[in-house]
């Protein structure tokens, strides 16, 4: 399962790498610190799952989600944000993505990625 991480926090990208690469069958195929770089990279990297932050400089996660909806064969999206669920979860799901709060356990993150990857097959 190929995973791409888009988050402006280098620390969160490193954490996602550690969580994902610790599991056989999961691999990080790329990362970006803002939405436009991510969208440009996705065409070449072709991940199964995109782990996406919402608040980033440049193109934020909301705009990236909107643009992904217009792409042919987009990856499944797991939005991980520090925004409280009551503020964003409904809108994230309406955009066709799944939501997980930052700070979720590694097991929760892995389970969400696996669920999304297998539903995109």
Image (cartoon, rainbow, N blue to C red):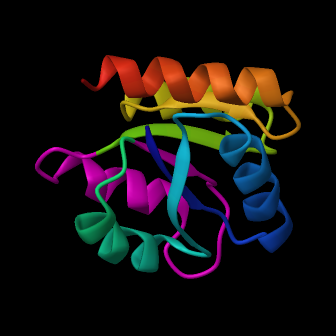
Q: What residue do we see at 49% from left, 74% from top?
A: 59
Q: Is residue 112 left or right of residue 29?
A: right
- Image quadrant where one finds the C terminus: top left
Please tell me which residue is depicted at 29% across the width and 26% down the height of the picture.
120
Q: Residue lying farthest front?
A: 24
Residue 54 forms part of the magenta stretch = yes
The percent position of residue 27, horizontal first and vertical second, equals 54, 48
At x 63%, y 54%, the residue is 53
Q: Going by the picture, which residue comes out furthest to the left? A: 72
Q: Nearer the viewer, residue 12 or 80?
A: 12
Image-based side of 7 in relation to 76, left or right: right
Q: Is residue 102 visible?
A: yes
Q: Quadrant of residue 107?
A: top right
Is residue 59 part of the magenta span, yes or no? yes
Give the total of numbered labels.
Answer: 0
Q: Is residue 86 visible?
A: no
Image location (x, y in percent) of residue 61: 53, 58
- Please tell me which residue lies in front, 25 or 12: 25
Instruction: Return the residue nearer the eye: 112 or 92.
Output: 112
From what the image shows, is residue 80 above or below residue 96? below
Q: Residue at x 40, y 28 (%)?
A: 117
- Location of residue 7 in the rendering, given as x and y in whole percent from the top left corner: 66, 64
Magenta span covers which residues? 49-74
Q: Quadrant of the N terminus?
A: top left
- The picture quadrant where one finds residue 33 is bottom right
Horizontal relation, residue 115 to residue 75: left or right: right
Relative image position of residue 32 (x, y in whole percent): 56, 73
Q: Identify the image quadrant of residue 19.
A: top right
């Amino acid at each position: 399962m190929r995973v791409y991480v888009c988050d402006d926090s280098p620390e969160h990208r490193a954490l996602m790498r550690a969580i994902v690469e610790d599991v056989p069958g999961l691999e990080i195929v790329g990362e970006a610190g803002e939405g436009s770089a991510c969208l440009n990279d996705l065409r070449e990297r072709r991940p199964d799952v995109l782990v996406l932050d919402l608040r980033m400089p440049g193109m934020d996660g909301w705009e990236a989600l909107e643009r992904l909806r217009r792409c042919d064969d987009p990856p499944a999206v797991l939005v991980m944000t520090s925004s409280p669920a009551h503020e964003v979860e409904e809108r994230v799901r309406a955009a066709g993505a799944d939501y997980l709060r930052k700070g979720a356990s590694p097991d929760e993150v892995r389970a969400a990625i696996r669920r999304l990857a297998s539903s995109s097959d």
